[in-house]
């Protein structure tokens, strides 16, 4: 049987803070977004490429910000590589905190295009 643990935001921050500390206190990280759509028995998927991964990478650190974004605990441990601001300190929008508006717009455009095709909305 699989054991399921439910943790609150502070427990998650504590866990990942300790984990990152065990790796030296700072690591380069990336949230890999992917999407899948099942329609008419077919499954199509969308995942970004390595260039987007490089542009979207950030630092995860062992020392949390004082600020919290409820429901998004890792924002308190995630730092923009360019501005060195915690995601939590910039309102929690990790895309906004990355600061590259053109890349963000292009990503969102590719995602919308995928969804239109996958859902047959063209």
Image (spheres, helix red, strand yellow):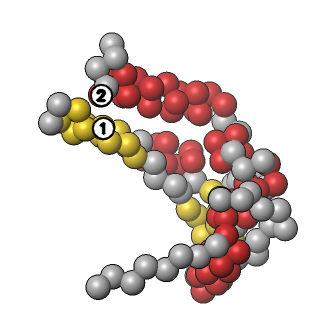
Q: Which mark is residue 8?
A: none
Q: Between residues 65 and 116, which one lies in front from this camera angle? A: 116
Q: Position of residue 62 (x, y in %)?
A: 70, 76
Label 2: state its secondary structure: helix
Displayed quadrant of residue 37? top left
Res. 17 in view: no
Cβ–Cβ below 8 Å for labels 1 and 2? yes
Horizontal side of residue 90 vs 4, given as left or right: right
The answer to whether 48 is drawn above or below residue 81 in the figure is above
Where is 99 relative to 92, above or below?
A: above
- Element type at mark 1: strand
The N terminus - image quarter: bottom left
The residue lying at 66 percent from left, 31 percent from top is: 101
Q: Residue furthest left?
A: 41
Where is residue 23 shown, x and y percent of the image? 58, 82
Image coords of residue 14 (percent x, y):
67, 80
Near mark 1 (Cα within 10 A), the count class, few <14, some 14-19 or many ≥20, is some
Spot occupied by residue 20 in the image (x, y as percentages of width and height): 61, 78
Q: Residue at x 60, y 86 (%)?
A: 22
From the viewer's side, name the closer residue of 73 and 97.
73
User: Quick one: quadrant of the C terminus?
Assistant: top left
On residue 118, which mark appears? 2
Q: Give the image quarter of residue 89.
A: bottom right
Q: Which residue is mark 1?
A: 37
Q: Nearer the viewer, residue 75 or 10?
A: 10
Vertical arrangement, residue 48 with respect to residue 18, above or below? above
For label 2, the crowd category at 10 Å Cα-Cα, with few meaning under 14, some 14 to 19 and many 20 or more, is some
Query: Number of marks in the image?
Result: 2
Can residue 42 be seen in the rendering of this structure?
yes
């Amino acid at each position: 049987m699989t054991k399921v643990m439910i943790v609150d935001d502070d427990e998650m921050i504590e866990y990942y803070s300790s984990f990152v500390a065990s790796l030296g206190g700072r690591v380069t990280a990336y949230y890999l977004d992917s999407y899948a759509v099942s329609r008419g028995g077919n499954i199509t998927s969308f995942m970004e490429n390595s260039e987007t991964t490089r542009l979207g990478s950030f630092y995860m650190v062992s020392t949390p910000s004082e600020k919290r974004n409820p429901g998004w605990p890792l924002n308190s441990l995630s730092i923009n590589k360019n501005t060195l601001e915690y995601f939590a300190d910039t309102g929690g929008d990790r895309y906004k905190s990355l600061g590259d508006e053109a890349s963000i717009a292009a990503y969102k455009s590719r995602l919308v295009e995928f969804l239109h095709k996958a859902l047959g909305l063209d």
